[in-house]
Image: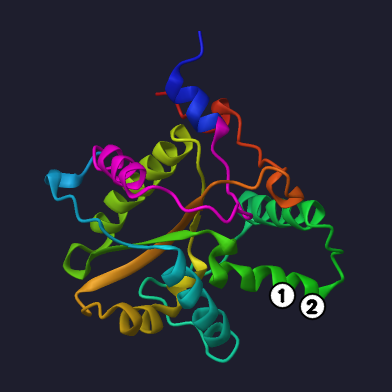
Amino acid sequence: MTSALETTLHARHSCRAYLPKPVAPSLIEQAVATAARAPSWCNAQPWQLIITQEAETARLGTALHAHAQAHEMQPDLPWPESYTGQYKTRRFDCGMQLYDAASIAREDKPARMAQMLENFRFFGAPHMALITSPRELGAYGALDCGGFVTAFCAALTEAGLGSIPQAAPAGYAPFLRDWFGLPKERLILCTVSFGYSDTSAPINSFRTPRAETNTLINWR
């Protein structure tokens, strides 16, 4: 028998096109409350969210989209040094699936760049959640927040919503910190864009595979 959790996790995917329809605050609050049940080291619960409504999402997206084209990234957390082996392959394959769904040719660099820059407009989502953690908690705070983000996306899926966790906007941490008046004591980890999925958009049609379970477990 397939469980409700299994159904939800299999249904969740990264949504990159949304309907122009806001989500009721009560529905968002319920998703946050559900996600807050995620495991937390010493029950620290380090996650804090700033959630934007439609007008603010659009205003921020316009400003961040322009900023990203004129400035270098300065993330609070360093990017991965490199992707090698199977991780490089998976990253490449995911990109090819995305471009194929969006009908972007591999050699069309301007179109690929334009698609990448949509990260900073939150893919047209009506809402964006900015996830932060106390700097003093370091990697363990970020680990806890990763669990929260997973649970949050699952809760949004269960509510009939689309979502996408994003690292790219957090690459401009100083810009976001100034925009929202956040103290330096809060690490900017990622954003989650969400709303009602545009199921007719081709870019929402592809699904990435997952590794076979027997390649993940080392029994001893």
Check disc 1 and give the amino acid type.
Answer: Met
Residue 141 in percent (x, y) is at 24, 57
Which residue is painted at 78% across and 51% down in the image? 101
Q: In this rendering, would 71 be left or right of 155?
A: right
Which residue is painted at 71% across and 74% down in the image? 114
Which residue is painted at 50% across and 8% down in the image? 1
Q: In this rendering, would 84 be left or right of 168?
A: right
Which residue is painted at 56% across and 79% down in the image? 65
Q: Crowdedness of circle 2 by 10 Å Cα count: few (<14), some, many (20+)?
A: few
Residue 12 painted magenta: yes
> Badge 2 is on which residue?
110
**Residue situated furthest top in the rendering:** 1
Where, by quadrant of the figure, is residue 53 drawn? bottom left
Q: Is residue 202 above or below residue 123?
A: above
Q: Crowdedness of circle 1 by 10 Å Cα count: few (<14), some, many (20+)?
A: few
State the extent of the magenta-drawn residues as a range: 11-38
Check disc 2 and give the amino acid type.
Answer: Pro
Residue 125 painted magenta: no
Q: Is residue 214 above or below residue 188?
A: above
